[in-house]
Image (tube, helix red, strand yellow):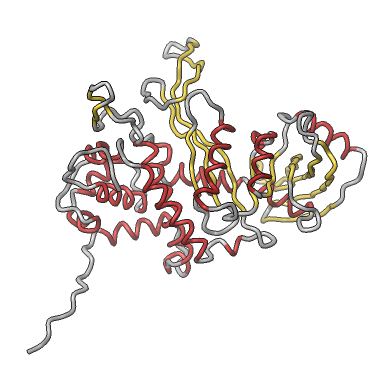
Amino acid sequence: MTDSRLDPEISPTRVFLALFYSFVFRIPSFQQLDSELAHSCLQHWIGADRAFRDDTLRYSLCGFDMAPLETMLVDVNRRLKRGKAFDSGRVQGRLVAALDGIEVVSSFSRRCEFCLERRVTRKDQAGRKIEETQYYHRAVGCQMVHSPVKPFLAIEWLRPGEGEETAALRLLRRLPDLYGSRFFDILLLDALYAQTPVLRLLREMGWDAVISLKQNARDLYQSAVRLFARRPPEVSFAESFGHKTYQVQIWDTDALPFSLDNPEPVRVIRSEEVLQRNHYRLGERTPHITDHEWLWITTLAPAVFPPNLVRQLGHSRWKNENNGWMDLTQHWAFKHGFLHACRHRPRHTSSSGQREAVPNHGLAAVVLILLIALALSSAFVLRHSKLARRDHLTAVAVAAQLRASARKRPPSIRAPAASR
C-alpha cells in the first residue's frame, strides 16, 4: 500500500487496515472510527504504534494508490473461486454475473474535479421553483449474483461528459485482463445495454448474455410483441412463493433481427405473469392481482437453456440491486460520500514548478476497500461463521460480535516458559 505522502509516520498499510476493520464492523463514518482508534485494542490489531485521528485517514486516502487495492480485490475473488465459493450457484454448469450502475453521491454545493454535472429543478424555502447545478458521482459495477457469496468483481466510475454505457464498455474490456475471459460465463444486463456495441463486445469476449428489452430498442420490441400476439405460448405454468402465486406464460423465438444496423437474428423471450397475493384491508384478507410483462434478448442456446430457465436468469438481475447496491447502501454506508470534495490532501510539484494538490481519489479508494471488506465478510459469514450457520445470526449481528471481540486484546500465543 502506498500513498502520496512523503515519509509518513502512520504507514498506508495501517490506514488501509483501520478502514478495512471499520467496514467489517459496519462503522458508518470516519468520526466513529476516530473514537475507535483512540482505544489501544484497535491500535494493536492494525499494528499502529499510537492513536491517530480521522484527518490522517483523509490525508492518506485522498492520495492513495489504487492499483494495490484493485489487485487485492481480484486476488480475493480468485481465491473464492478456487475455494469453490461460487459453485453452488452454477446454472447448467455456468457461473452468472450481473452488471448495473448506481448513483453514489450528489450535492448542490460540494464538488471535485471528477464530478458529473446536471441541471436540476427544485423548490427553495419559499416554495419557488429554481434550477440549479447538481454535482454527483455514478459508477458501474460487476457482481457475481447466483452464488451465496456475491462479491463485486470490479467497479468503474463515470467520467465527466460520458454516459453509463461508455463506462460499462470500459469495465467489460478490463475484466478479461483482471480475471481472464472465463471467470464467469453468463452476464445479466439492464435494458440500457441492449445496444450493438455491447453485443459485439460480448461476442468477442465469449460471454453469453441475458439482457432486458424495453422500449429503448423500439423496433425489436414492437416486432417481438406483434409476433408473440399471433401465437400461443410455448410454456405455461404456475408457481408459488409464500403468499404469492404466479401464473406464467412464456413465448420464445430466435429469428428476430436486432436492429437495422445489426440485422443478425437474436433470441427473444417474452414472459406474461399474473401475480396474485393477499392484502389485508380493514381486517379482512382480499386477493390482489397485478399483471407484468417482461422481455429479454439472450445468446443462450435453446437446447441447453429452455425459456423458463432464461426467465429465471432475467429476474436474477435484481439480485445485483437487492444483494449488491441496496445492501451496500443500507448496511455499509455506501452513499455516505466519503472524502467527496475533500480539500485536505497532499501536494506535489507540477510540471510548471507549482505546488498543487494531488488528484482526489479518496472516494474511489474508500469504495474499493469497502468492496474488499464486503467480499471477505460475506465469505466468512456464509462459509465459516458458526454464529450464522448454527445460531442463524444475520451478517449485521455477526459484525457486532466481531466488533465486540476486537475490543479485547488478542491472547498471547507465546509458548509457556519451560519449568525448571
Tell me which residue sits at (45%, 20%) in the image.
134
Tell me which residue sits at (46%, 34%) in the image.
104
* In this picture, residue 132 sits left or right of residue 33: right
Image coordinates of residue 274 in percent, x first then y, are 77, 45
Image coordinates of residue 400 in percent, x first then y, are 35, 56
Image coordinates of residue 145 in percent, x first then y, are 58, 52
Determine the image quadrant of residue 380: bottom left
- Residue situated in front as seen by the camera: 27 or 190: 190
Image coordinates of residue 2 in percent, x first then y, are 28, 45
From what the image shows, is residue 282 above or below residue 416? Answer: above
- Residue situated in front as seen by the camera: 234 or 6: 6
* In this picture, residue 89 sits left or right of residue 157: right
Tell me which residue sits at (24%, 30%) in the image.
348
Residue at far bottom of view? 420
Q: How many marks?
A: 0
Determine the image quadrant of residue 213: top right
Image quadrant in which the C terminus is located: bottom left
Residue at far left of view? 420
- Residue situated in front as seen by the camera: 237 or 82: 82
From what the image shows, is residue 326 above or below residue 80? Answer: above
Tell me which residue sits at (43%, 47%) in the image.
331
* In this picture, residue 366 sits left or right of residue 209: left
